[in-house]
Image (tube, grey):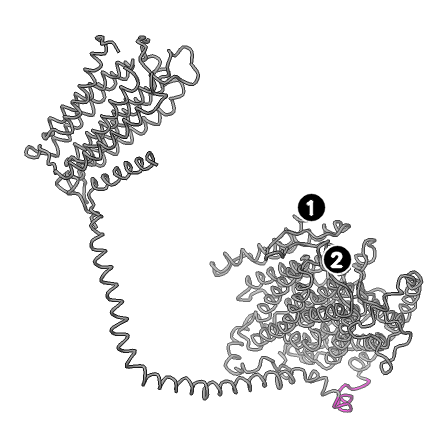
Amino acid sequence: MEFTLKTFIFYGFALLTIGSALAVVTLRNIVHTAFALMVTLFGVAGLYVFLQADFLAATQVIVYVGGILVLILFGVMMTSGRLEMRIHIERGQLLLGAGISIALLMLLLTVIANMPVWKNLTDDGRSLEPTTEQIGTMILQEKFLLPFEVVSVLLLVALIGAALISRKEVRD
Amino acid sequence: MVVPLISIILLAPLAAFAIFALFGLAKRSFPRQDILSTAAMLVALGCSLYLLNETSDPKPLTVEWLSLGSITLSMGFYLDSVTVIMLIVVTLVSSLVHIFSIGYMHGDPRYPRFFAFLSLFSFSMLFLVVSDNLLGIYIGWELVGLCSYLLIGFWFEKDSAANACKKAFLTTRVGDVGMFIGMMMLFSKFKTLSLHGTGGIFTLLTDPTKFTGDTADIVWLSIAGVLIFCGAVGKSAQVPLHTWLPDAMEGPTPVSALIHAATMVAAGVYLTARMFPILTSSSSLIIAYIGGITAIVAATIAIVRFDIKRVLAYSTVSQLGFMMLALGAGSYVAGLFHLTTHAFFKALLFLGSGSVIHAFHAMHAHHGEEHADDNEHEHDNHSLVHEHGSEIPPDQDMRNMGGLRRKMPFTFFTMLIATLSISGVPFVFSGFWSKDKILAGVLGRAMEWNSIHHYILFAVALLAAGITAFYMFRLIFMTFLGEPRNQEMHAMAHESPWVMVVPLMILAVLSFPVVNHLWFNKDNFKPPEQVHLHAPEQAVVLPDTKIGFTFFGISEAEAAEDEGALDAEQADDAHHVHEVAHNIAMALSIIVAGLGILLSWLFYHKRRFSAESVATTFRPVYTLFWNKYYFDEFYNGVLVALTVWKSRLFAKFDLSIIDGIVNGVATITRAIFAAFIDFFDNRVIDGIVNRVAKVIWSVGGRVRRIQTGAIQTYLFVVLGGIVLIILIFRVL
Amino acid sequence: MSLQHYLVISSILFTLGIFAVLTRKNAISILMGIELILNSCNLNFVAFSRFVEPAENIVGRGDYLLDGQIIAIFGIVLAAAEAAVFLAIILAIYREFGSIRPDEIDTLKG
């Protein structure tokens, strides 16, 4: 594989994603991990762009970075207090977790490497037309209309539920 | 069309009962059980009438029910003319009795339950009738027995009713045991209980590979036939198991009409008719004799009864004897025809007597308190056989009646019609035709075979017919004519409400020969063939020279040999003989019926002769009749006393010897083994138990810690497990 | 940049997420791990949808199906809902136990 600018940028995004994810799971300060997660999410958005999923990349940035991450930070603020920002880690648990995770990774990599139909599926370098319009059509007019409605109801229910659970209980 | 109709016929009454069983007890008074049950019966009646057109091609409709190894028991329906006529009789009488009961049982505290039981009974009886196999018949048979028990004991506060229902149940059970053994004999031989169709018993009887027809087989078949007939003896109250039926009159009168006159007791006759093809010469003769003896014994007892219901009960027994006699003498159609006509006029007589009783009393209003008192006074459970001769309820005692004809004109006229019918008044009443046919059948068989047995039976039947006319008119004269004997009760009497009178009138119409065409206008109706019944070959049979019927058919195989050549000739002869027999029998039966009525008129209306003086003159005979041939005393004195004595003996044996042994052993055991066992118990057994408990305790305490409650531990285990599983599957 | 590149990246993300869920002693960190896992899933969907040919090529849609992308969008929506509920539960737990350390919340301990 020739080493073009495109591949260089791709590997850059890949390393950014993985490196920041590593930071998410290793850093001791929870606020730091939250910011590392933000970087990871940005990296994934970049990978989406490489996969020609422009709309999805934008959604990823807006929803995750703008929504979920802020939510997480609020959660940190409301629960951890100033003194509990540091995360305790037990050595035994850490080793066991690492063992299981690495075993899992090895398995996945074995599967990926040994799947013949997945080989040679390379990016032909074509640039495709923007997907936003098509996605809009499919969601709002075609076969994903019903799932869209269902998922919107689900979101509503989740928000109401979250509000109900998190509010202070009024004891009478 | 047949199967759904039969299903409706069966399910309608069952549903009426089920609704009561499920919901009736929940609310204390389920409002309209009477309407429900009556409607169910009317539906069944409609379906039965429709089925009349469906009998041209009788074949069993079966489903496999139970597989026992290589043997399969099936359940199913069989619909031929006999079945349909029985269905109509049962549903019709049942419907009318339902309607009558609406009036008769009005105000009873267990009014809905009564109708539910009637529905259950109707279902059971109909199931019995349509079953194509002995197992189904047996199931229905026991179910009607249960319903009879429940309904006889319907007023169970009365000691006499409680005893009567036990007696009925146990007495019929004696016959049922015989019936079951007979069924099992057939089952062991043919490996099936189905009667009809290609795999049925009746077909297999003609199959030489299954049933050779040699002497041993005929003997075996005769015994099986007699044993099955035992069931009929119990259910149809034939001598010697007839004693329960008169006592069964303790039940409400509509029950007596439906169960103990028209339908259930006729089930025995129906069963015998269904089993007609397996009857051999010897079992036929036994049946005929039992029927004849029953007819005359019950008729003579009926003469001297004063309880209006018991007169009718003995009359029923007697008439059932007639039917059995007919079947035993080979007059299949006559027997079943008499069953039909008898069902109608006897139900009418019972309902009429119910109407009279209803007129007299306020029993329903306060029988509860009355019988609560009874319970304390007479509590004698030692004997199942209930003594009733001396304690006739005043509202059933004919000596209190008389002159009711003006008070109750409808009841009187309808009962008069039924009485004329049962007495055999010629030509316009159905009873005459059916009874005449029985007499003609017996006489015809006697002349055809020249059999002394059948001549005797004919004479007996004729005598019984005359006595029947006598006691039935005695009942009419004592109840409805003459002057009132008890002015106080007479003043209370009144005609019954319409709901009771209308069924009487319908039944009165049915006592005219309107139902005859069912039996005689059907081309397809002919009696089933009795394959193993043959005429004895000798011309004149005298009891002392040679017994006409070679018992258990020993010489029948020989007789069968030259049968083929003579067939046509014999058929002609037989026809001629029956023609002659019919004329003779008709003349004689008219004469005896007239004599009976005349004597009755002279005795009880004109008072030309005094019944009392005759009774004193023939004191021993009168005593015999009055005490019902001492059947009850025999059972009470011998069987019950024997059982009690035996039980006492065993109890004594139990107490002294068995208990002595047991106690002795116990003492020795306590002395010798107790110490050792105490040690063993405390150390070994307790030690083991405690050790096991301790081990489990400590293991549990350790294992408990697995359950940490920490979610991440669980997650570790889950993921580790997943990795392990995938590894295993990839390696293997 | 073949399909396998993306699959390897998503596998690593997934494994790191699992590691976080297994080892972190803070419920919010666990939530972050879950977010990592969800992202790896979405990346998988999009990658497969980009590279694997559809059974029948649908004209006018470009050369590949967008189904994977749309499912990824639904996945993002579900992640948002999940995060909201998760945080609500964490708040409730915090009020109840005064802590959000998963090993301290062990009322089911045997």
Chain of the residue under label 1: B
Numbered tag placed on residue B1 in the rendering: 1
Callout 1: SS: loop
Looking at the picture, which amino acid does disc 2 mark?
Thr
Q: Residues within 10 Å of mark 1 (few under 14, many from 20)?
A: few
Residues in magenta? B608-620
Looking at the picture, which amino acid does disc 1 mark?
Met
Please name which of the two marks, 1 or 2, marks the residue nearer to the observer.
2
B349 shown above or below B401 = above
Query: Where, by quadrant of the figure, is residue B87 drawn?
Result: bottom right
Give yes or no for residue B106 being in the magenta stretch. Answer: no
Q: Are the residues under badges 1 and 2 in a single subunit?
A: yes
Magenta highlight: main SS: helix
Disc 2 target residue: B203
Nearest the viewer among B725 and B201 is B725
Callout 2: SS: helix
